[in-house]
Amino acid sequence: MNIFAKSLLSKSQSGQRMFASVVRNKLEAKIVEQQKVFSAFKKEHGNTKIGEITVGSVCGGMRGMAGILYETSKLHPIQGINYREKDLYEIKEQAPRAEGGREPLPEGVLWLLLTGEFPNEQELKEFQSELYQRGHLSKDEERLIQAFPKDMHPMTQFSMGVMACQPNSKYAKAYRDGVHKSKYWETTLEDALDVCAKVPRIAGLVFNNSYGHGKPMPDQDPSLDYSANYARYLGIEDKNFSELMRLYLVLHAYIYFIFINFISDHEGGNVSAHATHLVGSTLADPYLSFAAGMNGLAGPLHGLANQECLRFLLDFQTKYGTKWTEHDIRDYVRDTLASGKVVPGYGHAVLRQTDPRFMCELEFANHYIHDDNLVNLVKACYRVIPDALAQTGKVSNPWPNVDAGSGALLMHYGLNQFDYYTVLFGVSRALGVMSAQVWSRALGLPIERPNSLTLNHLMKKVKNEL
Ligand code: HAX
């Protein structure tokens, strides 16, 4: 165990806080400042209109409706995902990396999501040790997860695994003990960091339970970073796979950091982020909220798109073999469209150009992967499919999204358990939604309670009869 882990542990043994979180002090001053800004803003602009709700918004799943204050993320139609006003290219360039590595460290990005800044070298080291300490599960928790039926869907196991750790919630205990509401954020931060630290282990146990064929689960290794430990739990020791995990966990956290931002779509509005936020608004603890988000992520219209994409590519290979041409791709896309299906991995509800997350994946593939037929197919699709989709005349964005490439990269390293892919997504998502929850508590956001209408009611409203 390294020196920082020891110092954190000794603090707990001497009866102080469980963990002397290094990020807490950074956050406190920012939170106090932001609470003032928020309070003044609400007072001044509480009645200012910022948009219109149409019948289409009400009937169409609230699309485009600004209705959530979500502190940590923003999706721009052109730039793509920004985390704390930094786009992905800036993040890739500025984020701390592992020694000898090229990809951003998720720990550094979690710090950025929480504080709006990257940690310095010392802060990062301490934060990594802190996460290592927080990442342990008790023997009972591990046994419970390993006792789940092996054929239970990995996402069900993952959500239940998070719930198995919920009795540790420091926020729930503080709430029961009557903590003042101005202090809710402190134990929410504790739980949020615990959840982020534990999810790779929970996800690793799920993987081991489902696909490990009785192999022992490796322990956490303090000499490895967050992603390399996770890669180890998945049984893939290739160092480049750890790099892929670093990139993957950063790309799917999905959060954009802009203070005081009214956002409606892919930031706080996507189902897993919104479900976490909604449940959290009841003052449910972060474990309960995060598990709710994961249940949403498990839905076919949300977290399963990358599997659909991979299936699309593999079905193509089944049909055309490995000696395909770009002409074959064109035919295959034409047949897909003619059969009334969408081309998975292409298009986006908000973005209007190639998803920068896809570009990061492509750049990873160009650097690390050579001569992989499936990866070459992803690249060829990028050359062919946008044109084919644009020719339909109706697709708003014919360019690839994040899901177009990720499955092929995972397959390259031997991670071919499709049902597990959403769990990887879930681990990454924890970084985004948990940091957002800290800010929601810090700003004292209220319980969410929109109005619902019956169709009859709505019909009367449009005729001004109500
Ligand atoms: N293939 C074929 N048709 C497509 C298409 C695609 N990839 N993308 C859009 N279209 C079609 C739509 O189905 C729609 O057709 P109809 O008018 O006949 O209904 C028309 O083009 C206009 O749709 P749009 O405005 O371009 O797109 P939407 O905002 O309605 O939908 C989707 C955005 C991402 C759902 C859509 O592009 C799609 O289905 N893509 C394929 C599935 C996919 O890759 N999903 C993962 C998205 C990444 C993500 O957000 N992950 O969380």
Image (cartoon, rainbow, N blue to C red):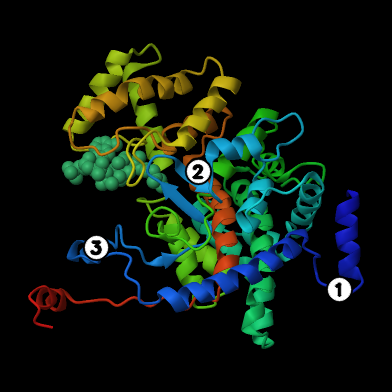
> Looking at the rendered structure, which numbered label has been put on residue 16?
1
The Cα–Cα distance between marks 3 and 1, rounded to whole angstroms, is: 50 Å
Give the amino acid at mark 2: Tyr
Name the residue: 54% across, 39% down.
88
Q: Position of residue 436 (x, y in %)?
A: 55, 62
Q: Position of residue 326 (x, y in %)?
A: 32, 15
Give the quarter of the figure containing the C terminus. Answer: bottom left
Name the residue: 50% across, 43% down.
421
Name the quadrant where ligand 1 sits.
Answer: top left
Question: Is the CB of mark 3 within 8 Å of ligand 1?
Answer: no
Q: Nearer the viewer, mark 1 or mark 2?
A: 1
Question: Is the CB of mark 2 within 8 Å of ligand 1?
Answer: no
Give the amino acid at mark 1: Gln
| Label 3 residue SS | helix
Whether the residues at callouts 1 and 2 have beta carbons within 8 Å, the answer is no
User: Where does label 2 land, which residue?
Assistant: 421
Q: Earlier in the sequence, mark 1 or mark 2?
A: 1
Question: Is the CB of mark 1 within 8 Å of ligand 1?
Answer: no
| Label 2 residue SS | helix
Residue at the bottom extreme, as displayed: 178
Q: Nearer the viewer, mark 3 or mark 1?
A: 3
Q: Earlier in the sequence, mark 2 or mark 3?
A: 3
Q: Residues within 10 Å of mark 3 (few under 14, many from 20)?
A: few
Q: Nearer the viewer, residue 378 or 232?
A: 378
| Label 1 residue SS | loop
Q: Is residue 158 above or below residue 101?
A: below
Q: Earlier in the sequence, mark 3 or mark 1?
A: 1
Name the residue: 47% across, 23% down.
375
User: Where does label 3 land, which residue?
Assistant: 57
Can residue 131 be seen here? The reply is yes
Residue at the front extreme, as displayed: 44
Q: Residues within 10 Å of mark 1 (few under 14, many from 20)?
A: few
